[in-house]
Structure formats: C-alpha cells, structure tokens
Amino acid sequence: MSMSISHSVVRRPSISLSALNSRHTWRLAEGDAERLTLNTGVAPPSIIISSRRKIRLNVVAAVDNLKSAALSPMDSQNSDIKVKKGVLNFVKYNGIGNDFIMVDNRDSLEPKVSPEQAVKLCNRNFGVGADGVIFAMPGVNGLDYSMRIFNSDGSEPEMCGNGIRCMAQFVAELENSHGPRSYTIHTRAGQIVPEIQSDGKVIVDMGQPILNAADIPTKLPGRKDGAVVKSELSVNGKTWIVTCVSMGNPHCVTFCHNDCEVLDVNSLDLEHVGPLFEHHEMFPARTNTEFVQVLSSAHLRMRVWERGAGATLACGTGACALVVAAVLEGRSERKCLVDLPGGQLEIEWNEKDNHVYMAGTAEKVFSGSALL
C-alpha cells in the first residue's frame, strides 16, 4: 500500500509499505520526536499529532517494499519503525485484590502465550501487572470450559480459587450472559463448579479437601489416618505448628510457633519467612503458606505467601484450606468469615458432603491489548 503525506517538513512525500493490516510507529525525519501510529488497514482523512501539526494520509497505490523517503526505517538516527510481532487482547479481573489477566482462549487447548511471556505480562512495572494469566479454554469430557493459569513466575498451578471466580464472570461476559448461572470447569485439580448469584457474588464448590500427606504432597509425618495436623516444622530457627491441606494445590497452614501462642499476622515479615516455607524440603512440590490469626470461632484473619506468586492480597484455595485446618485443630466452626488483605471470603466446610464452599466477589477492572 502506497501513501502520500503532506506536511511542511516533508520533502519527499511518497512511501510504500509491504505489510497490510500491521501497525507501524514512525517519527518525522526532520521533525520533532513526536510519533505517529499508522494502521495500514485503515486510511483516515487526518490524524492529529499535536495541537500545532496535522498530517493528511491518502492511499494511492499498491503493495511495495519499504523504501527510504522523508520517513526512514529504524536504523536511521532520526527515525524509527516498530512492527508488532503479536498482540494479546485481554480483560483484567480481580477477586478481592488477587488480580488476573484473562485471555479468551476458547479456540484452542494451547495457551496463547508462553510462560515466559506470562512473566513479562504480569510484571507491574514493565507489563500489564497481575498475579497470573488465566486462559478460558474449550471444555473437555462434556464440561463447559477448561481453565489453565500461569503464575507471575511462569509456573503453572493446579487451580486458583479467586481465579475460578474471575473465570466464571469472564466467560459470562464472553457469552453475553446475564443473571444467575453456573459453569462446569475442568482444571488440573479436577472439575470445579462456580455459580454466579443474582447479587454478583460467585459461590464455588471447591470439592473435598485432601488430607493424606503423600497426596498433598508433604514429607511431614501424618497421623494414623495420614493427615498432617499440628505437626512441628522448623523454619528460620523457630518451630512452627502446621496443618497441611490440599485443595487441589498444596497448603501449609500455621496459627502459631514456639515463641507465641497467637500470631499477629499484620506484623509478620512475610517477605522473609514466606519463601522459607515455600521452598522447604518437606514440600516436594513447594507449597502455599497461610499465616492465620483467630479472631473468633467464626472469624479468621490470614496473610498468604503463594507458591509461584509470593505475597498476594488474597488466595481462595488458601482461605478454604485454613478453615479446614482450623476445624481439624479445634480452633473454629465449619462456617467462617475470612479476612484477607484484599477483602473477605465466606468459607464453609460442609459436614454432610465433605465439600468446601467459597463465596466472594470477582470484578472486571479494564480491558486492553498488550504487545508480545
């Protein structure tokens, strides 16, 4: 596509582009450092560069190789061109502060971005910023959808509690669906069923907790029934009392150590102690760790160090695991309100079916496109 450009500083006004429907960033060869973005698939009558300058674009001829003119390629000292290698369209969601880049991946069971690209996208200074990238994929075995997630470090967890609530709202948006409804979603932790309520909250049947040590997995010794409850774990010169639970992903829950009977979680040096738990030799698949303060038998406060993401504002599977652990240790009722840095979750470990149910919000933040 050939274009003619009229501008007071342009002396050779003809350029040719060989790529259709691609985006190029140019800088005027003799002008200031102002940049103009041209979408060669669209030829608007004019584009304002600043309050003082206007460039008029006209499509005049067919495809040719890029030739030097008043606008020259990137290797010129005074001008450049940037060709997009790929663009990812996304929607940003958060579940009480646990934030995710949501990707419409319904046309394939292969993620649209690699783990390395996910790391860059999650970077809060040089990318979009998120705790993870979630892919909404086609369902398998008759289920509605499949979900995969890459953490901010590029690792792939089995499941994410806050993420599954965001997933439910995201696919409802993709379907243009309104009002209450539920979805069956395949995850690496098995089938999960989130249900959107009329008030916008999402209730999730998180399934049954896994308590057998080898299945969590942890090398800590279990009781006769295989559960690891109130076990001692040496970390950073202290003996922590821990209970281990899997909600499809491993969790180590602690309420105290040998120097204190009750944790003040707000004063905890999470950035220091969190990685020591995550990479402890007793957890062959690493672990998420919940540090819990009991406010009452039905009200708990927690801070979390997530495997692969570090300190986050919330962790849905962690909130579920801590209520299970609190019940096993005799510290709480089966239905609790859990305070997290980003908000509150309602958790119930149902005695009849042994399933854990989680209720909380999932909110859209913004949508956009990111260069890969």
Image (tube, rainbow, N blue to C red):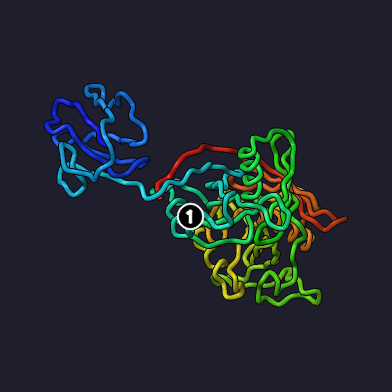
Foreground pick, 160 / 7: 7
Q: Is residue 47 left or right of residue 206?
A: left
Position of residue 257 in the picture relative to residue 111 (left or right): right
**Residue 112 visible:** yes
347 or 154, which lies in front? Answer: 154
Residue 302 shows in this picture: no
Question: Label 1 belongs to which residue?
Answer: 113
Image location (x, y in percent) of residue 300: 70, 50
Residue 209 image offset from top left, x and y in percent:
75, 61
Displayed quadrant of residue 159: bottom right
The kind of residue on which mark 1 rests is: Val
Q: Nearer the viewer, residue 294 or 23?
A: 23
Residue at the outermost right position: 352
Q: Quick one: 282 or 198, which is closer to the camera?
A: 198
Coordinates of residue 175 in the picture (x, y in percent)? 64, 38
Q: Is mark 1 on a helix, strand or loop?
A: loop
